[in-house]
Image (spheres, helix red, strand yellow):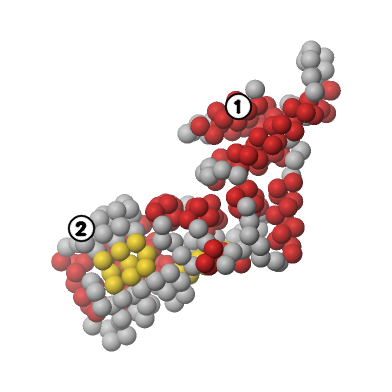
Amino acid sequence: VHRSAVDQVLYSQTGHLDLFLRFLLGLSLESIQKLLHSLVTQTGSSSQNKEETVQYIKKKISRNINTEKSINLFHCLNELGDDSLVEEIQQYLKSGAQSELSPSQWSALVFVLLTSAQDLEEFDLNKYITPEKIRDEILVRVMPVIAASRKAICSKITKRRSVKALTSVLNSKTSSLRELHLTVNTLKLTWNKLEDSGVKRLSALLENPGCKVKDLWLCDCGVSDEGCAALASALRSNPSHLRDLNLSRNKVGDSGVKCLSAVLENPHCKLEIL
């Protein structure tokens, strides 16, 4: 029953079963079983069933599920009285050491950071993993933490899934991200429907000197004159890094071209290809 309920929650697109699953698993605790003894005719081997459910949930957490579902599963483990993954990652954070994390540990790290009582002022991915070991699936897992942080430091966002996740952050009205330090040279957001709203948020991040992007591809992203004005403002604030700005197949009119052309007249602007 528990496995079936977990699977239904993971397949659900609405999240309407999340609280029900926590409630159902909470009923399986031995202490609750005793309270309900007069109503439950057979408790069976509840401790064995509980452990099987715990292991099944941990197995699901280790897979590439989205963050919302992962967080709900951690709440389910809490209902079952198992905080081992969370305690493990908390010890890791206290130690200050950097070691290779498993997929489950990455999920636990995201859960701990997102459910912390403190606001996330800064998230530096390089504290947890060396840049050369950063993989696309890790970036996708931590993207909700990047969205919840005011400042994020990340070495690379180059693969399709992580680029798509970043696009969602840029398009999100609830994202707290105000400062993004990207040491990657090329950021290709081509064919992601950022529209002007997403480009405005991206431009605000590009204004920061900590953003080292040299080549920015925004082909077919729904950018109009309004988005070009935001990009021009970013280039005026931080003119020393961007070399190549690709805006092909967008809705750029005379006003947008005029804004960007004016930036090129700045002797400090390093833009070479537009």
Furthest toward the bottom, the residue is 267
In the picture, the quarter occupied by the C terminus is bottom left
Amino acid under disc 2: Arg
Mark found first going from the N terminus, 1 or 2: 1
Question: Distance of mark 1 from mark 2, alpha carbons?
Answer: 46 Å
Q: Is residue 84 left or right of residue 244?
A: right
Query: At 37% across and 65% down in the image, what residue appears?
Result: 187
> What amino acid does circle 1 point to?
Ala
Q: Residue at x 74, y 51 (%)?
A: 87
What residue sits right under mark 1 in the picture? 5
Q: On the picture, is 48 further left or further right than 242?
A: right
Can you give x and y, in whole percent of width and height, for residue 11 in the image? 51, 32
Of 176 and 181, the residue lying toward us = 181
Quarter of the image with the N terminus in it: top right
SS at mark 1 in the image? helix
Residue 230 vertical placement versus 142 (above, below): below
